[in-house]
Image (cartoon, coloured by chain):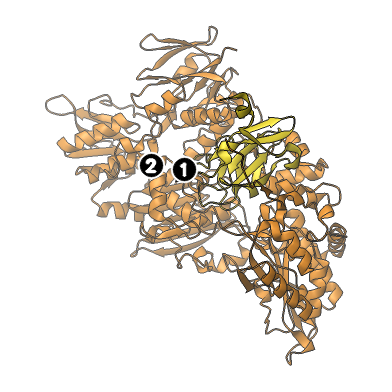
Chain colours: A orange, B yellow
C-alpha cells in the first residue's frame, strides 16, 4: 500500500518531538516531509542563552543532526518558507516554488517576536532574540560595537542583556513595568535581582517606554534610542525582547480558525481535521504555551493521533516558572503574589541576597517566589502540585526539605553546591558531572529521560530530588517537571489510580481484560506494568482474579531472593523471631548438605541461607520443613518482637505472643510493597517499632499503634495512630490499616508514601473514628488471607511452576 | 556435505509445551547456560543466559513482546537479536532455533563450547 504523505511546516522542538513520537509508534505509516525556514536542523532553542554567554557552542545545541533526518527517511527542506497552503488541493507551496502534496499537515510554526511599532524599528542593528541568526548577529556586533539596549526586562531580555555584557558590551535594559519580570516575581525579589545584575554592570531604565529609534551619523545602522520624556541614549544594537506572539499568518491565510494562536482541539487538530498544530503556534482551550514541557505533552498526543491510535487526549498543562538568569537563582510558581484569603511566610536577608516567600491558602501551598537560594524549589513545587496539606509541617516549611534526614548522599541536599565529581546516585554511581553532560549533549528535559540515559535515580529513587535540581539548574525555565498525573509506564497513559478504579468499577479480573478495555499499547505489557496489574487484580478481587506468576518479579516466581551471581537466598519464617532447636538443627543440616556459602542472621530476626542454586530450591524447602519467610516478596516480611513480660523485668505486655499472632494472621499477605511490623513490650521499644509500617508498643494500660515508619532509604519515624486495650483490637486496627493500604496505595509505594499522599486525618477517620469502616476492612483482609497457601509446600495452589527448577542438561553434543 | 550431515546439525532440546508461556527454561550446554524463551505468540528464542550489563541471568526476567527484562538491573534485551534496547548498549549471544511439530531444536555447532 502506498504510504500517506505527512508534511510538517516548521522544524523546531515541538514539531520534531511530534515526529520522534510518531516514529516510535509507527515508523512505516508516513512518507514525511519537513520544511524549515532556518538553514539549521532542529536545535535546542532554550540553550541559545548559554551560546550567547559563551558557555556552549552552536554545534553543541543541535538536537537532531542531518543524519537523523536521513536515517529516518525524512525529506528535509531547509531554508524554505512555506507561503501558501491549499487545503482543497492539499498542497503547500514554498517561497522557492517547491510544491508538496499532503494527506496530513502538521503546523509547527512557533512564534514570532513582538516588534515595537516605533519609527526606526527596521534599521540594521535592530533585532529580536529568537534564533541562531539573531544570536550570531549579537555575538558579531559585540566584537565591533560598544552600546547595547535591550527592550524588555523579562527573562529573555535579561538573558540577552547578561550575554551581551559578558561579551563586553555596555548594556541598558528598558522595561515598561514597575519592576523586572513582573509576571514571575514580586517586587522584593525583582529588586534583589536588579541589584545583583547592576553589580554585574547592567543598567536599567524602569517604567520607561520607547518613542523612536534613530540611525547613526553615517546613516547605515542604528545609532541611538529615544524614550518618552525625551531622554536619548546611544545604541549600536537594539534587541527587542518585549514578548512573543504565535506565528499564525500562514494558518490564517489558509482559512484556519485562529484566536491568539491556531485553535486546536484536545487531539491537536485544527478546524480542518487533516491539519494539526503543535507548539507555540497552537492555542489550546484559550492558552498558547511557551514552555517545553506542555509542548512535549502536546507532541505525544498529536503523534498518537497521527499514528491512528486515537486514544490520547491533551487536556492542558499546569505550568510553573522556574527561572535561571545566568548566575542568579530564581524560582516562582503558582500564585506568588498572594491576595485575599491567603497567608504569606517570608524570609528576607537583603544583605546576603536571599529572599523567600511562600503563599498559603487553606493549609495548602499555592505559590512561591524565591531569590538567591532555590534549593528547595522542586520540593515546594511538588507540594503545590499535589495540593498536599502543609498544616503539620508549617513551622519548618520555610527551612525546606533538607531538615528531614536522607541517608546515603553524604548529607548533600543541594545539587548546586556539589562539584561535578560528587556522586548523586549512590546506587548506580552516577556523578553530577555525568548527569549535566547527558542533559546537555543528549538534549534531555525530563526526569524520566535522565533516568533512562544515565540510570541516575532509577534504582532506589532517593536521589530524585537532587536529579530534579540538576535538571532545573541546567535547563532553567524549560525544565519539565514530572507531570502531576503520572502514567503507569510506557504501555498506557493511565495513572495507577485510574487503573485501580477501572479494575474495580469494571469488575476486571484478568490482565488481558485490563489491557483490552484500557487500550494498552503493548500486547502483554512490560516489566513495569505487569507486576502492578497483577497485584491490583488479586488485591481487588481476591479468590476470583487469577494470580499470574509470569507477571511477578523473579523473586515472587521462584519464592527466593535472586542474588547478583544468579543464585538465591532462602529465609524460612520464624514467627515473631522465635525458633526451636529442631528448626536450627534442620537449618544446619541443609546448610552443610547444600554447601551454603553464607549463613547470616537478618535484621528481621531470622536466618538467611545465601548462595543456593535454583535447581536445589525445592529440596532445600522440603528438608527445612519450615514455612516460607516471604523475604523476597512485596508482602508481609516479619513481625519483629522484643522479649516482653514473659521474661523481661521491664515488660508490661506479652510482645512475643502478640507478634506471633500478628505474623500468623498476616501469613501470605501480598501488598503494594514489603510490609514490616514490630511489637515492643514496653516504651523502651527494643523491637524498634518506631521505624516499621506498623509499630506496636505495649504500655501498662494496653497498646499504642504507630504507622508509616520506615528504616530504609529515608528514615521515617512512624506516626501515632491510636491506643487500644486488647490483643484483638491490635489485630483489628493493624489489619484494617494494612487492608486500606493494600486497597488504595499505588504499587511499590510503602506505607509511608501512602500516608503522605492521603494524610493521617483520612486514615484516622477510616480506622479509628468509623468503626464500621474498620470492621469491614478487617473482614476483607481476613477473607483475602483465608487459606493462604505456603508457596514452599503447596506448589499447586500457590501457582509455582516447578519446571523452572529443572535445568535441561545437554551432556554431549554430537559431532557436527 | 551429505544430507544426513545436514539433518544432524540440529540437536533436540525439549518441546515448546515444556517452556512456560511468557517464561523460559535454562539449558546447560558446553557453550554455557542458554536461556530459551517462549512468548505469548508461541515464538521461541534462545539467548546466552548472561545479560551484557553485569551478567545477570536473563532466563529469570519478565518476558514481554519479543523482549525480556533482566532481573538484576532491568535492562531490556531484544530476544530476536540478544541485544540491549536503547539507550543501553551491548549484546548477549543469540542462538538459532528451529521448531518442528512442537519440538525445539538448537544448532549443534552453536551448542559446542567455543575454544580460544
Residue that lies at the very extreme toward the left in this rendered image: A218
**In the rendered view, would you say A734 is above or below A170?**
below
Most foreground residue, A254 or A689 = A689
**In the rendered view, would you say A538 is above or below A665?**
above
Can see residue A40? yes
| Left or right, A444 with reference to A115 | right
Mark 2 — on which chain does it sit? A
Task: Identify the residue at horizontal 64%, vertical 49% (top origin).
Answer: B60
Can see residue A181? no
**In the rendered view, would you say A12 is above or below A200?**
above
Q: Position of residue A794 (x, y in %)?
A: 83, 58
Q: Secondary structure at mark 2?
A: helix
Residue A217 is labelled as none
Q: Position of residue A159 (x, y in %)?
A: 33, 43
Task: Identify the residue at horizontal 47%, vertical 64% (top origin).
Answer: A409
Residue that mark 1 sits on: A445
| Left or right, A165 with reference to A680 | left
Q: Position of residue A58 (x, y in %)?
A: 30, 35
Most foreground residue, A55 or A794 = A794
Mark 1 — on which chain does it sit? A
In contact (CB < 8 Å): disc 2 and disc 1: no
| Left or right, A392 with reference to A262 | right
Residue that mark 2 sits on: A441
Q: Quadrant of the C terminus of chain A?
A: top right
10 Å neighbourhood of mark 1: few (<14), some, or many (≥20)?
Answer: many
Residue that lies at the very extreme toward the bottom in this rendered image: A649
Q: Position of residue A116 (x, y in %)?
A: 34, 29
Amino acid at each position: 500500500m502506498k504510504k500517506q504523505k505527512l508534511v510538517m511546516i516548521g522544524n523546531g522542538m515541538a514539531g520534531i518531538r511530534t515526529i520522534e513520537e510518531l516514529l516510535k509508534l509507527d515508523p512505516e505509516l508516513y512518507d514525511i516531509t519537513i520544511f524549515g525556514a532556518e538553514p539549521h536542523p532542529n536545535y535546542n532553542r532554550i540553550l541559545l542563552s548559554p551560546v550567547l554567554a559563551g558557555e556552549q557552542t552552536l554545534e553543541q545545541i543541535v538536537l537532531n543532526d542531518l543524519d537523523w533526518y536521513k536515517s529516518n527517511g525524512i525529506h528535509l527542506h531547509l531554508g524554505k518558507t512555506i507561503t501558501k497552503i491549499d487545503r482543497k488541493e492539499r498542497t503547500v507551496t514554498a517561497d522557492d516554488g517547491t510544491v508538496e502534496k499532503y494527506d496530513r499537515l502538521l503546523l509547527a510554526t512557533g512564534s514570532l517576536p513582538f516588534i515595537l511599532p516605533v519609527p526606526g524599528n527596521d534599521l540594521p542593528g535592530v533585532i529580536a532574540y529568537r534564533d541562531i541568526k539573531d544570536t550570531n548577529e549579537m555575538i558579531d556586533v559585540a566584537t565591533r560595537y560598544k552600546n547595547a539596549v535591550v527592550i524588555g526586562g523579562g527573562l529573555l531580555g535579561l538573558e540577552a542583556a547578561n550575554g551581551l555584557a559578558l561579551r563586553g558590551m555596555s548594556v541598558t535594559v528598558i522595561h515598561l513595568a514597575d519592576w523586572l519580570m513582573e509576571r514571575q516575581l514580586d517586587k522584593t525579589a525583582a529588586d534583589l535581582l536588579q541589584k545583583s545584575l547592576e553589580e554585574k554592570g547592567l543598567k536599567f531604565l524602569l517604567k520607561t517606554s520607547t518613542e523612536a529609534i534613530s540611525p547613526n551619523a553615517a546613516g547605515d545602522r542604528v545609532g541611538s534610542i529615544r524614550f518618552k520624556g525625551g531622554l536619548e541614549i546611544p545604541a549600536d544594537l537594539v534587541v527587542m525582547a518585549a514578548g512573543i506572539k504565535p506565528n499564525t499568518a500562514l494558518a490564517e491565510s489558509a482559512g484556519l480558525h485562529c484566536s491568539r494562536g491556531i485553535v486546536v482541539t484536545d487531539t491537536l487538530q485544527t478546524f480542518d481535521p487533516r491539519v494539526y498544530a503543535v507548539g507555540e503556534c497552537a492555542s489550546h482551550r484559550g492558552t498558547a504555551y511557551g514552555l517545553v514541557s506542555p509542548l512535549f505533552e502536546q507532541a505525544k498526543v498529536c503523534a498518537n493521533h497521527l499514528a491512528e491510535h486515537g486514544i490520547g487526549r491533551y487536556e492542558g498543562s499546569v505550568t510553573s516558572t522556574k527561572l535561571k538568569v545566568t548566575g542568579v537563582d530564581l524560582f516562582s510558581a503558582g500564585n506568588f503574589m498572594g491576595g485575599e484569603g491567603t497567608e504569606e511566610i517570608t524570609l528576607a536577608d537583603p544583605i546576603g541576597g536571599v529572599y523567600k516567600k511562600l503563599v498559603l491558602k487553606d493549609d495548602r501551598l499555592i505559590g512561591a517566589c524565591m531569590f538567591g537560594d532555590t534549593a528547595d524549589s522542586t520540593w515546594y513545587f511538588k507540594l503545590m502540585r499535589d495540593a498536599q496539606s502543609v498544616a503539620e509541617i508549617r513551622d519548618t516549611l520555610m527551612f525546606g526539605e533538607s531538615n528531614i534526614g536522607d541517608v546515603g548522599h553524604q548529607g548533600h541536599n543541594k545539587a548546586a553546591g556539589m562539584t561535578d565529581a560528587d556522586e548523586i546516585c549512590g546506587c548506580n554511581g552516577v556523578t553530577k558531572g555525568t548527569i549535566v553532560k547527558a542533559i546537555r549533549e543528549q538534549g534531555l528535559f525530563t526526569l524520566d529521560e535522565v533516568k533512562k540515559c544515565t540510570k541516575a535515580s532509577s534504582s532506589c529513587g532517593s536521589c530524585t530530588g537532587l536529579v530534579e535540581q540538576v535538571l532545573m539548574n541546567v535547563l532553567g525555565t524549560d525544565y519539565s517537571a514530572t507531570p502531576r498525573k503520572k502514567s503507569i509506564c510506557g504501555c498506557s497513559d493511565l495513572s495507577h489510580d485510574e487503573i485501580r478504579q477501572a479494575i474495580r468499577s469494571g469488575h476486571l479480573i484478568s490482565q488481558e481484560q485490563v489491557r483490552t478495555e484500557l487500550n494498552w499499547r503493548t500486547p502483554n505489557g512490560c516489566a513495569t506494568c505487569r507486576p502492578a496489574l497483577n497485584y491490583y487484580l488479586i488485591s481487588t478481587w481476591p479468590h476470583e482474579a487469577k494470580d499470574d506468576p509470569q507477571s511477578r518479579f523473579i523473586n515472587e516466581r521462584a519464592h527466593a531472593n535472586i542474588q547478583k551471581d544468579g543464585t538465591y537466598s532462602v529465609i524460612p519464617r520464624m514467627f515473631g523471631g522465635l525458633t526451636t532447636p529442631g528448626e536450627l538443627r534442620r537449618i544446619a543440616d541443609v546448610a552443610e548438605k547444600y554447601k551454603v556459602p553464607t549463613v547470616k542472621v537478618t535484621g528481621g530476626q531470622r536466618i538467611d541461607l545465601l548462595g543456593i542454586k535454583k535447581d536445589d530450591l525445592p529440596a532445600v524447602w522440603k528438608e527445612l520443613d519450615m514455612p516460607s519467610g516471604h523475604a523476597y516478596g512485596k508482602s508481609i516480611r516479619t513481625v519483629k518482637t522484643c522479649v516482653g513480660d514473659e521474661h523481661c523485668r521491664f515488660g508490661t505486655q506479652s510482645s512475643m505472643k502478640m507478634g506471633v499472632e500478628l505474623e500468623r494472621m498476616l501469613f501470605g499477605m501480598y501488598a503494594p510493597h514489603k510490609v514490616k511490623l514490630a511489637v515492643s513490650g514496653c516504651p523502651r521499644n527494643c523491637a524498634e517499632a518506631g521505624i516499621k509500617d506498623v509499630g506496636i508498643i505495649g504500655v501498662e494500660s494496653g497498646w499504642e499503634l504507630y504507622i508509616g515508619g520506615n528504616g530504609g532509604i529515608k528514615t521515617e519515624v512512624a506516626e501515632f495512630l491510636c491506643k487500644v486495650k486488647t490483643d484483638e483490637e491490635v489485630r483489628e486496627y493493624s489489619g484494617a490499616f494494612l487492608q486500606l493500604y493494600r486497597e488504595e496505595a499505588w504499587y511499590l509505594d510503602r506505607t509511608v508514601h501512602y500516608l503522605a499522599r492521603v494524610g493521617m486525618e483520612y486514615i484516622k477517620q477510616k480506622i479509628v473514628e468509623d468503626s464500621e469502616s474498620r470492621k469491614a476492612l478487617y473482614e476483607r483482609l481476613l477473607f483475602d488471607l483465608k487459606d493462604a497457601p505456603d508457596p514452599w509446600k503447596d506448589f499447586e495452589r500457590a501457582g509455582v511452576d516447578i519446571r523452572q527448577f529443572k535445568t535441561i542438561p545437554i551432556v554431549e553434543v554430537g559431532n557436527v | 556435505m551429505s544430507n544426513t550431515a545436514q539433518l544432524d546439525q540440529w540437536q533436540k532440546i525439549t518441546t515448546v509445551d515444556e517452556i512456560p508461556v511468557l517464561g523460559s527454561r535454562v539449558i546447560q550446554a558446553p557453550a554455557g547456560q542458554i536461556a530459551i524463551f517462549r512468548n505469548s505468540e508461541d515464538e521461541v528464542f534462545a539467548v546466552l543466559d548472561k545479560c551484557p550489563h553485569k551478567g545477570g541471568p536473563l532466563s529469570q526476567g519478565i518476558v514481554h513482546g519479543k523482549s525480556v527484562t533482566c532481573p538484576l538491573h532491568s535492562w531490556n534485551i531484544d530476544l530476536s537479536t540478544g541485544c540491549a534496547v536503547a539507550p543501553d548498549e551491548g549484546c548477549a549471544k543469540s542462538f538459532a532455533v528451529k521448531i518442528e511439530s512442537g519440538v525445539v531444536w538448537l544448532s549443534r555447532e552453536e551448542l559446542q563450547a567455543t575454544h580460544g
